[in-house]
Image (cartoon, rainbow, N blue to C red):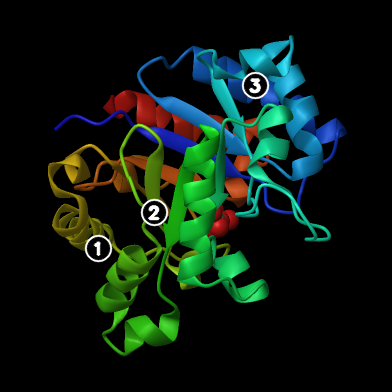
Amino acid sequence: MARRKLIAGNWKMNGSLAALAELDGIAAAARAAPGVDVAIAVPATLIAPAVARVSGIAPAAAREPGLAIGAEDVHPAEKGAHTGCISVGMVKEAGAVFSIVGHSERRADCHETDQQVKAKAEALRRGGLGAILCVGETLDERDAGRAEAVVTGQLAASLPEDAAADWLSIAYEPVWAIGTGRTPTVADVAAMHGAIRARLRALIGQEADAVRILYGGSVTGDNAAELLGAGDVDGALVGGASLTAAKFVPIVEAGAALA
Ligand code: PGA
């Protein structure tokens, strides 16, 4: 089945109002590549100004084709006594149309469990937002030959109810490849994405064939074409190289060339 490529950036705890100028070039590249979907997740404080910058108008227009702006995390509850947390309704009001959930940095830094990740994804679905759900093994787990079991286990335990391709993507991000400049071989990536697809089929049937599976971890303009061309790789989740248009646009163009 043909799946549109999704090239998504993740600014993590980087960026500023001044840095939003980078979105101009990224949005222009997105408009020039109608065959791929392009998205950037930014820190919560930057969602509204990012949406205003790329749309030039009110947040309600954020679903227009071009560059989609999203959040990096959400809390599963609608509201309440959760100091410092941000709800789906809040990021939606700011103009976000999706959020990342279960990034390995949150699983590690904030001790997020598969159960919590699942609840966050379900909150996004209830709110009408998209989700990019991250899974990935550590180097110890890979060295022990457990990478596939760990990743598919995370997937099974954190997959939301009503998982469907129109709102959910999966991102395979080996923890040891994030921000390190190291990547798995293309064969390893293809094998893992195939294993994720097979597990998804077991869990949600043929809908699994429509769900996009992104690769993340040290994706750059130099390796994007090779990684995006691997079997069952339907896009990329990009950290460091999403911070500037100069580094991110070549990744968008690599995706467009395969569309
Ligand atoms: P990286 O980060 O591209 O800087 O390795 C990827 C990610 O954590 O999503």
Which is in the foreground here, disc 1 or disc 3? 1
The residue mark sitting in front, 3 or 2, is 2
Q: Position of residue 227 (x, y in %)?
A: 32, 48
Q: Is residue 141 visible?
A: yes
N-term mark: 2 or 1: 2
* Three-letter residue code for mark 1: Met
Secondary element under disc 1, as helix, strand or loop, is helix
Disc 2 secondary structure class: loop
Q: Residue furthest top?
A: 57
The foreground one among 205 and 108 is: 205
**Above-or-below relation of 138 to 127:** below
Q: Is residue 132 above or below residue 158?
A: above
Q: Nearer the viewer, mark 2 or mark 1?
A: 2
Query: Relative to 229, is 202 on the left or the right?
Result: left
> Residue 192: which disc?
1
Residue that protrudes farthest toward the bottom in the picture: 144
Q: Earlier in the sequence, mark 3 or mark 2?
A: 3
For label 2, the residue is: 160
> Residue 195 appears at what percent x and percent y?
19, 62
The residue positioned 60% from the left and 25% from the top of the image is 26
Q: Is residue 88 left or right of residue 117?
A: right
Q: Residues within 10 Å of mark 1 (few under 14, many from 20)?
A: many
Q: CA distance from mark 3 to mark 2?
A: 34 Å
> Would residue 220 be visible to someone looking at this image?
no
Task: Classify 10 Å Cα crowding around label 2: few (below 14), some (14-19), many (20 and above).
Answer: many
Please name the residue that numbered disc 3 is placed on: 25
Type of amino acid at the residue the image marks with label 3: Gly
Residue at the image point whose x is 60% and y is 20% from the top: 27
Q: Amino acid at mark 2?
A: Pro
